[in-house]
């Protein structure tokens, strides 16, 4: 959900892009970037 909000892309479109990666499609750059940031935030929160 964070990725969707930060990219200003509907959640269903983010989900569709993620599913498309199983068919050898690349994630769009804005989604890749926000997904990386979201994972870093989760990792940092886990370390606390």
Image (cartoon, rainbow, N blue to C red):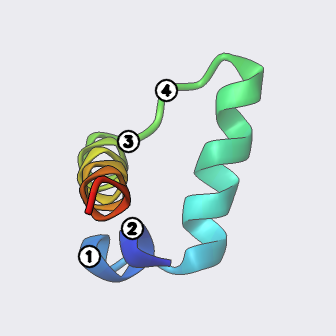
Nearest to N terminus: mark 3 or mark 1: 1
Residues at marks 3 and 2, CA–CA distance in whole angstroms:
12 Å
- Answer with left or right where residue 47 lies relative to residue 21: left
- Mark 3 and 1 residues: CB-CB less than 8 Å, in contact? no
Q: In the image shown, does 33 or 38 lie closer to the viewer? A: 38
Residue under label 3 = 28
Residue placed at 39% from the left, 76% from the top? 2
Q: In the image shown, does 34 or 42 lie closer to the viewer? A: 42
Residue under label 4 = 26
Q: Position of residue 18 (x, y in %)?
A: 63, 45
Residue placed at 24% from the left, 46% from the top? 33
Nearest to N terminus: mark 4 or mark 2: 2
- Mark 4 and 3 residues: CB-CB less than 8 Å, in contact? yes
The quarter of the displayed image where residue 5 is located: bottom left
Residue under label 1 = 6
Q: In the image shown, does 20 or 45 lie closer to the viewer? A: 45
């Amino acid at each position: 959900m964070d990725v969707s909000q930060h990219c200003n892309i509907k959640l269903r479109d983010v989900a569709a892009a993620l599913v498309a990666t199983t068919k050898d499609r690349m994630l769009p750059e804005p989604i890749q970037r926000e997904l990386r940031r979201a994972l870093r935030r989760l990792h940092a929160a886990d370390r606390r």
